[in-house]
Image (cartoon, rainbow, N blue to C red):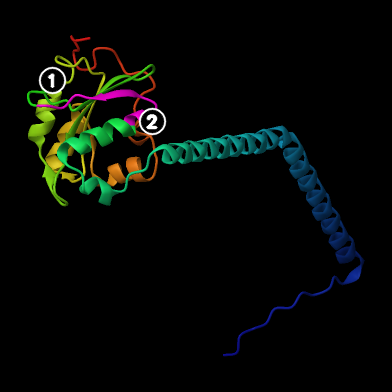
Amino acid sequence: MARRRFRVRRPRGTAEQIAAVAVAVAVAAWLMQAAVAVGRAVLGGWPVLAALAMAGIVSGAVLGFRRARAGRGRAQRLARLRLTLAEIDALSDQEFEFALRDLLIRDGWSARQVGQQGDQAADVIGQDPQRGRIVLQAKHTKVGGKVGSQVMYQVKGTAGPAHGADIAVVVTNGFFTRDAKAWGDKHQIHWVDRDRLRTWAEHGVALGDLLRLPARAPRRAFGRSAA
């Protein structure tokens, strides 16, 4: 069976024509009312749209400024000191400690190398007016070497009581075991593995930014007792 095609039939007679005109007028009136309503809604929401647009512009400008400032900071730090992983791998254990000290100084900390036999899990100690005292434990390993949880336990036990640290960090040119990283994250022992070390030493990102250290470390973070 062929499909039936429907066609619109023109109004016939005066009555149908009047009815058609009335429907057309009603539709036109409805469309006009809808257009007015939409216009009012747009005009009424204009302050909101303008505020959102302005907020977006301000947010973008602030973000751009921060990125530009961070870029300038990295460039300045790299101009003072830049160490590649290959250079770090070639260092001796003690040279690695001095390199970490110099990187802290580059970032604006006052720092000294203190590592020696019986150092109680502290190789570098630094001081910052806003962030307080930081203790670094250096673990220079062969490429691919891993640092386990035992080091984290030692640092946790001595950072505050023995060294008065607000911040404790274990740094290696190798890697950490999964358990060591998890334990460190849970107990506020920061860790810098090979990838993070590259970002710090080679790419110029400050350690405080890399580890998202607080602007002012909480007092007695490790139950500090030493000055």
Q: Residue at x 83, y 54 (%)?
A: 28
Residue 165: percent from left, percent from top? 23, 18
Q: Which mark is residue 223?
A: none
**Residue 225 falls in image quadrant:** top left
Residue positioned 62% across, 34% down in the render? 58
> Left of 150 or right of it: where is 184?
right
- The part of the image, by quadrant, that contains residue 160 is top left
Earlier in the chain: of badge 1 and badge 2, it is 2
Segment tinted magenta in the rendering:
104-116
22 lies above or below 219: below
Mark 2 neighbour density, 10 Å: few (under 14) some (14–19) many (20 or more) = many
Along the line of sight, the residue nearer the viewer: 129 or 180: 129
Query: What residue do we see at 14% from left, 49% from top?
Result: 142
Q: Are marks 1 and 2 in contact (CB under 8 Å)?
A: no
Instruction: Confirm whether the magenta stretch covers residue 159.
Output: no
Which tag is nearer the camera, tag 1 or tag 2? 2
- Label 1 crowd (10 A; few <14 / some 14-19 / many >=20): many
Left or right of 1? Residue 183 is left
In x, y percent, where is residue 23? 82, 57
Question: Which residue is farthest bottom?
Answer: 1
Image-based side of 80 in relation to 42, left or right = left
Residue 151 drawn at (x, y percent):
11, 32
Q: Secondary structure at mark 1?
A: helix
Q: Residue at x 17, y 35 (%)?
A: 94
Q: Which residue is mark 2?
A: 107
Q: Name the residue type under label 1.
A: Thr
* Residue 1 sits in quarter: bottom right
Please tell me whether mark 2 sits on a helix, a strand or a loop: loop
Q: Which residue is mark 1?
A: 158
Residue 202: % across, % down: 35, 45
Which residue occupies the extreme right position in the image?
Answer: 14
